[in-house]
Amino acid sequence: MNEHVSLPLQAEEAFQRPDSRPNTRKVFIKTYGCQMNVYDSTRMSDALASDGYVTTEEMAEADLILLNTCHIREKAADKVYSALGRLREMKKTRAAEGRELMIGVAGCVAQAEGEEILRRSPSVDVVIGPQTYHRLPEALRNARAGKRVVDTEYAVEDKFEHLPQPEKAKVRARGVTSFLTVQEGCDKFCTFCVVPYTRGSEVSRPVQQILDEAERLVDGGVREITLLGQNVNAWRAEGPKGGEWSLGDLLYRLAEIPGLARLRYTTSHPRDMDDKLIEAHRDLRTLMPYLHLPVQAGSDRILKAMNRRHTAAEYLRLIERIRSVRPDIAMSGDFIVGFPGETDRDFEDTLRIVEDVNYASAFSFKYSTRPGTPGAELGDQVAEEVKSERLERLQALLLKQQADFAKSCVGKVIDLLLEKPGRMPGQVIGRSPWLQSVNVDAKTSQIGDIIQVRIIGTGPNSLFAEPAGSLVGA
Ligand code: 5AD
Ligand code: SF4
């Protein structure tokens, strides 16, 4: 722990608040990165609410700004440091006005950089890693007492046991879809990836904790839950009657919760798609026909160098099996181009696997060297221009597949979960079973309902639909 940077006296005085006075501070949380960070931000907001903080959407009115950061690619961390540069200016202006502004860095950059953040960004008060969010109120109190805090331990106590659950009204205000983290961390050690170092090894939350949280969410009006984990299908825990449950068993159990209309899960590793999970896709209508199953590359040589521990053919066979039990499943994936040593031929294999699978959506990235990962030690790094050119070709193909998939939906009657008001009055945005945004004429009072609609057209990032009669489930 370092000593607090000293501020002009007048500002410091203004910060002092007798502990007996209620906290009326406002927090603004900026979330970078993946869905797990989105979920973590809501849990941090809940933890701070129990200490009196109100979450605001307006950065200008915040007394505390928290950056919930991502470390997966280089640019993500750069973004954080430049945001901290801007916040430093804001803090100076505030200090001159005699108003407090505390700055916290949470998430994976906090975990990876730790003390380094305090060195590079003197305006930061608190650095808190993803495993210690339950200690955030305490860290802020310490920071306010003059200690800049770095808390990036892999806490032995279970943070989920300590994190407060939100009030019902708060759940309701957050909408009809929700994330729920069931698993964190990763033991796979893909050679390009920082996750095993930033999020630690695989940890699964116990069944009862997950059921309690799911039931609370449903009680607060949530209709669709997406189970989250860096390696969500590696989730394993003791079942209620003893014996080990895998993610498939958990999905069967969650599907029994009355009022819970839809289930999803992300992100999965091909090696952890077990029979039970595939059966769940066959049996559970609640389980949406959409699967994010990253393959990263199509060349066996590169897959091996990435330590993915499966071949392209094994991945394709797996998808075939899943499609044989759930033919309407939409596939999504992640791809990396320009992993060290990737030749034109290897890259052609990636294009081929994309052709073979036919993705409904996908994310693709240029390989980004992450210090501390085995990939960073490899020679034969691919030139930036080559990466750019490959990414462009790959994205053109993936975008075409995505557009073709959207077009193939036109004319279909589908179930739509109405989620939020649309941009135009009288319109509501809903989600298709395949995770597409769909605009339809409906009343905002219908939000939370599942209605049947006919898809009538496609836009750049969404579909258009008209009501097609019946209400499927209110
Ligand atoms: N460079 C580029 N992309 C990466 N990803 C993970 N690490 C890296 C890296 N070093 C991508 C993978 C992963 C997704 C979340 O981010 O495709 O599935
Ligand atoms: Fe990273 Fe691989 Fe683990 Fe996914 S499976 S989090 S890519 S190490």
Image: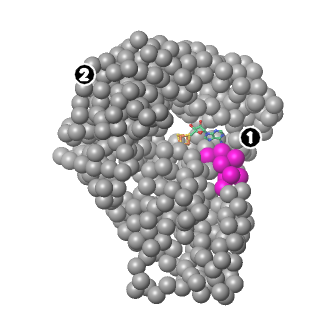
Q: What stretch is highlighted in magenta?
A: 72-80
Q: Which amino acid does label 2 sit on?
A: Ser
The spot of residue 385 in percent (x, y) is: 81, 31
- Measure the C-alpha gap from mark 2 to mark 1: 58 Å
Evaluate if marks 2 and 1 touch, with contact meaning CB atoms under 8 Å apart. no
Q: Is-magenta flag for residue 418? A: no
Q: Is the magenta stretch mostly helix, strand or loop?
A: helix
Is residue 11 placed above or below 214 in the rendered structure? below
At which x and y percent is residue 316? 50, 19
Q: What residue type is labelled 1?
A: Leu
Q: Residues within 10 Å of mark 1 (few under 14, many from 20)?
A: some
Q: In which quarter of the image is the N terminus?
A: bottom right
Quadrant in which residue 473 is drawn? top left
Q: Position of residue 448 (x, y in %)?
A: 31, 38
The dot on residue 470 is: 2
Residue 77 is inside the magenta segment = yes
Q: Mark 1 points at which residue?
A: 378
Tell us which disc is closer to us: 2 or 1. Answer: 2
Pick the residue in front: 470 or 423.
423
In the rendered structure, which disc, 2 or 1, sits on the residue that comes first in sequence? 1
Is residue 45 visible in this depiction of the protein? yes
Q: Which residue is drawn at 71% across and 44% down?
A: 369
Q: In the rendered image, which quarter contains the C terminus?
A: top left
Asked if the beta carbon under badge 1 is closer than 8 A to the nearest atom of ligand 1, the reply is no
Which image quadrant shows ligand 1?
Answer: top right
Residue at x 46%, y 87% (from the top left corner): 18
